[in-house]
Amino acid sequence: MIITKEKTIEEIYSMLEPHKKILIISCDGCVQPPRGLKQADIMLKLLELKRKLENKGFEAKTTTILRQCDDDITVSTIKPILDHEEFDAILSLACGVGVQIVAGIYEIPVYPAQNTLFMGAKIGNDYYEKCAGCGDCLLGYTGGFCPIANCAKSLVNGPCGGPIDEKCEVGNYTNPCAWIEIFKRLNSRPDGIELFMKFRTSVDYRKRNNPRKYEEKVIEVERTNI
Amino acid sequence: MREIKARKFVFTGELEPEKTTNLHELIEGAKIMKDAVVAANVTDNPQSMAYMSSLVASYTVQKESGLEMIYQLRCSDRNRIALTSDLLGAGHLGIRNILALTGDHTSLGDTPEAKPVFDLDSSQLCYLIRKMVDKGTDLNGNNIHDPPKYHVGVAGNPNCVPLEAEILKLGRKIEAGAEFIQTQVIYEIELARTFIKEMERYKCPILIGIFPMKSYGVAAYFDKYIPGVHVPKHLLTDLKAVKDSDLDKSAKEQKYAEVNFEYFVPFIQELMKTKAAGVHVMAVGWESIIVELIQKAYGE
């Protein structure tokens, strides 16, 4: 899931200041904490209240999209709305990907309501970065614990000299040292020490030079009756 | 390295360029310890604070003092292109030793907003250096005309728990080409013995790090703010007693030195009985203590 943090209401007010009629679009995709229709309606109420207090005219509507990052779904969802009604701005509750998809469809200004943080997991009530999208997954060799996302230095030959009591110096010793965690996980496996001792001479950063794209090759398989 | 290879018990010192363009104090410090140590490290932006270039300081202090420098080089601030470039420069300037370090995270320094680099880590930097020296190429195998000649060392952390993770990691660094290890500060002789024993499997020379403390304030700061290292309580008490005494400034300085001798002279003598290659004395700005410590350790 993509983890986002809502921008301050002051920044959102400020971005929308010049606009009078706003479409607020939420996303029902992977964005977390939830940024769906309920959150869009709350946002609408907040904006209404602010404008009312300032005695400024304001009109807004809300809608939601199954996955704002999917161009086909987004076009087919908002086209019927925007073809029939004029809005002078859109506020998107999606991650940065969704915002860009919406912004690429019409010439109406689109504003993000979120700061997009990371790809992560929900554990308990909190969200943790778990994958950095490095393009060269090491999880098969590191006990299923990612050193790129979980090590503050993204080291591939850790640990560094920083951990105390198995905790990383970055973040004031609240996060586990990724490489001590990897060592503990591998240590109990028969092939673990060999995996831990593996020396990686360098990382090929071309795999994560942005902008990246992936072209899915469509393979046609002929159905045969067995 | 010559002395280490000759299996002499050696000492190295440490110099720290600061946020200044002036190297006068470092040159004088190097001159003081010149006859007692085989070389001195020159720190590279320690704790991710932007100080004067370690390369410039290494070259100038080595030239002016005649003491061999160990040029510390961190991966925190430079990618492999910049590292290679600085290493070629170091070769030209006659730098003979490099300590390859990953470096503290940039967020821990006085400019925490800076972008951390970490394109390479210390073992990969070792590997790069060995390629430059042994194969005459950069990391990608591109030829270097007049390749450099220097020795490369790495840092070890005997305070790491579990220690085995650190020992195995040092194994990787040695596989990458590290020729010597200088450790973080240790106060417990047993910890030093354990570390040296565990490291025997690699047969790589180890210099154990010690930190003589010029005042109670320095000791208290070190105890509180340097992660994972604790100054023994009785040592702190002895240093505090000096601070609280009625002695005048110079008598206090002498007393502080005596407390350090009391602790570190037997410590060094115990290390001499182990397979350690020597001691790395991190007495930044207090070079005279290094000379006296060594003399006393040899019973002079």
Image (tube, grey):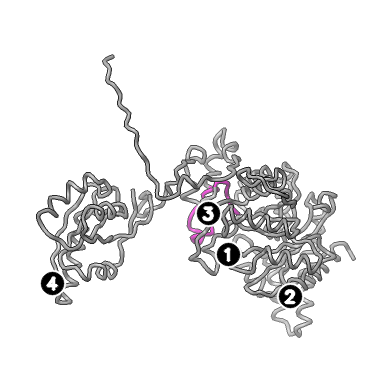
Question: In which quadrant is the C terminus of chain B drawn?
Answer: bottom right
**Discs 4 and 3 lie in a common subunit:** yes
Q: Nearer the viewer, mark 2 or mark 3?
A: 2
Q: Nearer the viewer, mark 2 or mark 1?
A: 2
Distance in Å between CA atoms under marks 2 and 3: 35 Å
In the image, residue B120 lies at what x, y percent? Answer: 58, 51
Callout 3: few (<14), some (14-19), or many (20+) C-alpha neighbours within 10 Å?
Answer: many
Write down the chain letter for disc 1.
Answer: B
Residue shown at the point (71%, 46%) measured from the top left: B199
B171 lies above or below B292? above
Which quadrant of the view contains residue B67? bottom right
Write down the chain letter for disc 4.
Answer: A
Write down the chain letter for disc 3.
Answer: A
**Disc 3 marks which residue?**
A153
Distance in Å between CA atoms under marks 2 and 4: 69 Å
Q: Nearer the viewer, mark 4 or mark 1?
A: 4
**Discs 2 and 1 lie in a common subunit:** yes
Mark 1 lies on a secondary structure that is helix
Residue shown at the point (23%, 67%) measured from the top left: A16
Distance in Å between CA atoms under marks 4 and 1: 52 Å
Residue A167 sits inside the magenta stretch? yes
The numbered mark at residue B24 is 2
A150 lies above or below B110? above
In the image, residue B90 lies at what x, y percent? Answer: 70, 58
Write down the chain letter for disc 2.
Answer: B
